[in-house]
Image (tube, helix red, strand yellow):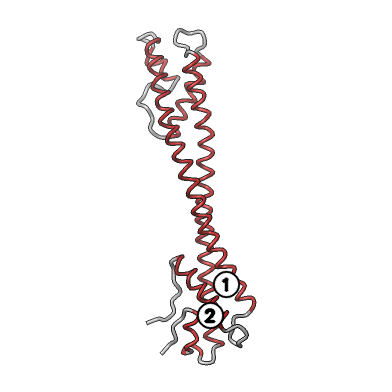
Amino acid sequence: MAKNVIPNKLEDVVEMLKVVQSGDNLYAGEDFALTAELRTKVDDSVTAIDNSKMDVVSTQGIKETVVQQSNEKRKESRAVISRTKSYLVSQMPKLQKDKLLQGYLLDNAMPQAFNGIFRVLQAIVQENTAQVGEAWELPAPILIDATAVRDAMATLQISVEAAKGAYHEAMQNQRNAKATGRVMLRRVREYLYAMLPERKKDMKLKEFGLDPWD
Protein backbone atom coordinates (compact mmCIF):
# COMPACT_ATOMS: atom_id res chain seq x y z
CA MET A 1 0.00 0.00 0.00
CA ALA A 2 1.36 3.43 -0.94
CA LYS A 3 2.69 5.54 1.89
CA ASN A 4 2.59 9.30 2.35
CA VAL A 5 -0.10 9.97 -0.22
CA ILE A 6 -0.56 13.70 -0.53
CA PRO A 7 -3.93 14.76 0.96
CA ASN A 8 -6.60 16.30 -1.23
CA LYS A 9 -8.81 18.17 1.22
CA LEU A 10 -7.89 21.82 1.70
CA GLU A 11 -7.73 21.63 5.49
CA ASP A 12 -5.53 18.53 5.35
CA VAL A 13 -3.18 20.15 2.85
CA VAL A 14 -2.64 23.30 4.90
CA GLU A 15 -2.33 21.28 8.13
CA MET A 16 0.40 19.13 6.60
CA LEU A 17 2.20 22.18 5.23
CA LYS A 18 2.24 23.64 8.75
CA VAL A 19 3.65 20.38 10.12
CA VAL A 20 6.39 20.63 7.49
CA GLN A 21 7.14 24.16 8.71
CA SER A 22 7.36 22.90 12.28
CA GLY A 23 9.63 20.02 11.30
CA ASP A 24 11.91 22.30 9.32
CA ASN A 25 12.12 24.70 12.26
CA LEU A 26 13.07 21.77 14.50
CA TYR A 27 15.92 20.70 12.24
CA ALA A 28 17.10 24.11 11.07
CA GLY A 29 20.77 24.01 10.21
CA GLU A 30 20.82 20.29 9.50
CA ASP A 31 21.99 19.05 6.11
CA PHE A 32 18.52 17.76 5.35
CA ALA A 33 16.73 20.98 6.33
CA LEU A 34 14.69 22.41 3.50
CA THR A 35 16.47 24.65 1.05
CA ALA A 36 15.72 28.36 1.33
CA GLU A 37 13.77 28.22 -1.93
CA LEU A 38 11.70 25.23 -0.84
CA ARG A 39 10.98 26.68 2.60
CA THR A 40 9.92 30.01 1.10
CA LYS A 41 7.49 28.28 -1.22
CA VAL A 42 6.06 26.21 1.62
CA ASP A 43 5.54 29.39 3.64
CA ASP A 44 3.97 31.12 0.63
CA SER A 45 1.60 28.18 0.14
CA VAL A 46 0.41 28.33 3.74
CA THR A 47 -0.16 32.07 3.44
CA ALA A 48 -1.97 31.69 0.11
CA ILE A 49 -4.32 29.01 1.46
CA ASP A 50 -5.06 30.93 4.67
CA ASN A 51 -5.76 34.10 2.65
CA SER A 52 -7.93 32.18 0.20
CA LYS A 53 -10.07 30.85 3.03
CA MET A 54 -10.68 34.38 4.32
CA ASP A 55 -11.46 35.62 0.80
CA VAL A 56 -13.98 32.84 0.21
CA VAL A 57 -15.78 33.58 3.49
CA SER A 58 -15.80 37.31 2.76
CA THR A 59 -17.02 37.08 -0.84
CA GLN A 60 -19.59 34.43 0.06
CA GLY A 61 -21.02 36.73 2.73
CA ILE A 62 -21.22 39.63 0.31
CA LYS A 63 -22.84 37.43 -2.34
CA GLU A 64 -25.48 36.13 0.07
CA THR A 65 -26.28 39.66 1.26
CA VAL A 66 -26.69 41.03 -2.25
CA VAL A 67 -28.77 38.03 -3.37
CA GLN A 68 -31.04 38.53 -0.35
CA GLN A 69 -31.43 42.20 -1.25
CA SER A 70 -32.32 41.28 -4.83
CA ASN A 71 -34.91 38.76 -3.61
CA GLU A 72 -36.52 41.40 -1.41
CA LYS A 73 -36.54 43.88 -4.29
CA ARG A 74 -38.03 41.23 -6.55
CA LYS A 75 -40.99 40.85 -4.19
CA GLU A 76 -41.46 44.60 -4.08
CA SER A 77 -41.26 44.79 -7.86
CA ARG A 78 -43.88 42.09 -8.33
CA ALA A 79 -46.25 44.11 -6.14
CA VAL A 80 -45.65 47.21 -8.30
CA ILE A 81 -46.26 45.19 -11.48
CA SER A 82 -49.50 43.79 -10.05
CA ARG A 83 -50.68 47.28 -9.10
CA THR A 84 -49.77 48.61 -12.55
CA LYS A 85 -51.67 45.87 -14.34
CA SER A 86 -54.74 46.40 -12.17
CA TYR A 87 -54.76 50.07 -13.04
CA LEU A 88 -54.29 49.46 -16.77
CA VAL A 89 -57.04 46.84 -16.88
CA SER A 90 -59.39 49.25 -15.13
CA GLN A 91 -58.75 51.98 -17.72
CA MET A 92 -58.29 50.17 -21.04
CA PRO A 93 -61.17 49.50 -23.47
CA LYS A 94 -62.23 45.89 -23.04
CA LEU A 95 -61.84 44.97 -26.72
CA GLN A 96 -58.34 46.47 -26.91
CA LYS A 97 -57.16 45.35 -23.49
CA ASP A 98 -55.30 42.16 -24.46
CA LYS A 99 -53.48 43.80 -27.35
CA LEU A 100 -52.58 46.90 -25.36
CA LEU A 101 -51.27 44.85 -22.43
CA GLN A 102 -48.80 43.15 -24.79
CA GLY A 103 -46.89 46.40 -25.10
CA TYR A 104 -46.36 46.39 -21.35
CA LEU A 105 -45.48 42.65 -21.33
CA LEU A 106 -48.47 42.21 -19.04
CA ASP A 107 -50.48 39.86 -21.25
CA ASN A 108 -49.00 36.72 -19.63
CA ALA A 109 -48.58 35.39 -16.10
CA MET A 110 -46.43 37.32 -13.67
CA PRO A 111 -42.74 36.38 -14.15
CA GLN A 112 -40.92 34.80 -11.23
CA ALA A 113 -37.27 35.23 -12.22
CA PHE A 114 -35.31 38.40 -11.55
CA ASN A 115 -34.54 39.04 -15.23
CA GLY A 116 -38.15 38.47 -16.28
CA ILE A 117 -39.43 40.93 -13.70
CA PHE A 118 -36.87 43.52 -14.78
CA ARG A 119 -37.93 43.19 -18.43
CA VAL A 120 -41.58 43.81 -17.52
CA LEU A 121 -40.69 46.90 -15.49
CA GLN A 122 -38.59 48.18 -18.36
CA ALA A 123 -41.49 47.62 -20.76
CA ILE A 124 -43.96 49.36 -18.43
CA VAL A 125 -41.89 52.53 -18.25
CA GLN A 126 -41.13 52.57 -21.97
CA GLU A 127 -44.69 51.78 -23.09
CA ASN A 128 -46.15 54.39 -20.78
CA THR A 129 -44.06 56.99 -22.61
CA ALA A 130 -45.62 55.84 -25.88
CA GLN A 131 -49.12 56.01 -24.38
CA VAL A 132 -48.93 59.54 -22.95
CA GLY A 133 -52.30 61.23 -23.26
CA GLU A 134 -54.30 58.02 -23.40
CA ALA A 135 -56.92 57.28 -20.78
CA TRP A 136 -54.76 54.50 -19.37
CA GLU A 137 -51.59 56.59 -19.01
CA LEU A 138 -50.16 55.68 -15.62
CA PRO A 139 -50.70 58.18 -12.81
CA ALA A 140 -47.54 59.71 -11.34
CA PRO A 141 -47.45 57.62 -8.11
CA ILE A 142 -47.53 54.32 -10.01
CA LEU A 143 -45.06 55.47 -12.65
CA ILE A 144 -42.67 56.76 -9.97
CA ASP A 145 -42.81 53.41 -8.16
CA ALA A 146 -42.30 51.43 -11.38
CA THR A 147 -39.34 53.58 -12.39
CA ALA A 148 -37.79 53.39 -8.92
CA VAL A 149 -37.95 49.61 -8.64
CA ARG A 150 -36.73 49.22 -12.23
CA ASP A 151 -33.69 51.38 -11.49
CA ALA A 152 -33.07 49.60 -8.20
CA MET A 153 -33.21 46.21 -9.91
CA ALA A 154 -30.81 47.38 -12.62
CA THR A 155 -28.31 48.38 -9.94
CA LEU A 156 -28.84 45.16 -8.00
CA GLN A 157 -28.39 43.10 -11.15
CA ILE A 158 -24.92 44.58 -11.57
CA SER A 159 -24.15 44.06 -7.88
CA VAL A 160 -25.30 40.43 -7.93
CA GLU A 161 -23.21 39.61 -10.98
CA ALA A 162 -20.18 41.33 -9.46
CA ALA A 163 -20.63 39.53 -6.13
CA LYS A 164 -21.06 36.16 -7.81
CA GLY A 165 -18.02 36.81 -9.98
CA ALA A 166 -15.90 37.74 -6.96
CA TYR A 167 -17.02 34.61 -5.12
CA HIS A 168 -16.26 32.32 -8.07
CA GLU A 169 -12.87 33.98 -8.46
CA ALA A 170 -12.12 33.46 -4.77
CA MET A 171 -13.10 29.81 -5.05
CA GLN A 172 -10.84 29.37 -8.08
CA ASN A 173 -7.98 31.08 -6.26
CA GLN A 174 -8.51 28.67 -3.37
CA ARG A 175 -8.43 25.67 -5.69
CA ASN A 176 -5.22 27.03 -7.22
CA ALA A 177 -3.68 27.59 -3.78
CA LYS A 178 -4.55 24.05 -2.74
CA ALA A 179 -3.08 22.62 -5.94
CA THR A 180 0.13 24.57 -5.38
CA GLY A 181 0.25 23.39 -1.78
CA ARG A 182 -0.07 19.77 -2.87
CA VAL A 183 2.78 20.27 -5.34
CA MET A 184 4.94 21.66 -2.54
CA LEU A 185 4.14 18.69 -0.30
CA ARG A 186 5.25 16.32 -3.05
CA ARG A 187 8.47 18.27 -3.48
CA VAL A 188 9.14 18.21 0.28
CA ARG A 189 8.43 14.49 0.45
CA GLU A 190 10.82 13.67 -2.36
CA TYR A 191 13.45 16.08 -1.03
CA LEU A 192 13.40 14.42 2.39
CA TYR A 193 13.52 10.95 0.84
CA ALA A 194 16.69 12.07 -0.92
CA MET A 195 18.37 14.01 1.91
CA LEU A 196 17.59 12.23 5.19
CA PRO A 197 20.31 9.81 6.38
CA GLU A 198 17.93 6.83 6.33
CA ARG A 199 16.02 8.05 3.27
CA LYS A 200 12.43 6.72 3.22
CA LYS A 201 12.97 4.78 6.45
CA ASP A 202 14.21 7.73 8.48
CA MET A 203 12.19 8.27 11.65
CA LYS A 204 12.63 12.03 11.31
CA LEU A 205 10.04 11.91 8.56
CA LYS A 206 7.44 11.88 11.32
CA GLU A 207 8.42 15.40 12.29
CA PHE A 208 7.42 16.49 8.79
CA GLY A 209 4.05 14.71 8.88
CA LEU A 210 5.29 11.69 6.90
CA ASP A 211 5.47 8.02 7.82
CA PRO A 212 8.78 6.16 7.58
CA TRP A 213 8.76 3.11 5.34
CA ASP A 214 9.24 -0.28 6.97
Q: Which residue is mark 2?
A: 23
Name the quarter where the C terminus is drawn: bottom left
Secondary structure of residue under mark 2: helix
Q: Work out which residue is located at the far front of the displayed protein and give it.
A: 26
Secondary structure of residue under mark 1: helix
CA neighbours of label 1 inside 10 A, class few (<14), some (14 to 19), many (20+)? many
Labels 1 and 2 touching (C-beta < 8 A): no
Question: In the rendered structure, which amino acid carries the disc numbered 2?
Answer: Gly
* Residue 72, x across and y down, in percent: 43, 34
Question: In the rendered structure, which amino acid carries the disc numbered 1?
Answer: Val
Q: Which residue is mark 1?
A: 42
143 up-or-down from 174: above or below: above
CA neighbours of label 2 inside 10 A, class few (<14), some (14 to 19), many (20+)? some
* Residue 202, x across and y down, in percent: 48, 89
Name the quarter where the N terminus is drawn: bottom left
Q: Residue at x 47, y 78 (%)?
A: 209
* Residue 203, x across and y down, in percent: 47, 88
Q: Is 189 positioned to the left or the right of 83 in the image?
A: right
71 up-or-down from 83: above or below: below
Q: Earlier in the sequence, mark 1 or mark 2?
A: 2
Q: Is 57 positioned to the left or the right of 32 in the image?
A: left
Q: What is the spatial separation of the Cα atoms under label 1 and label 2, in whole angstroms?
A: 12 Å
Q: Work out which residue is located at the far right of the displayed protein and give it.
A: 36
* Residue 154, x across and y down, in percent: 52, 32
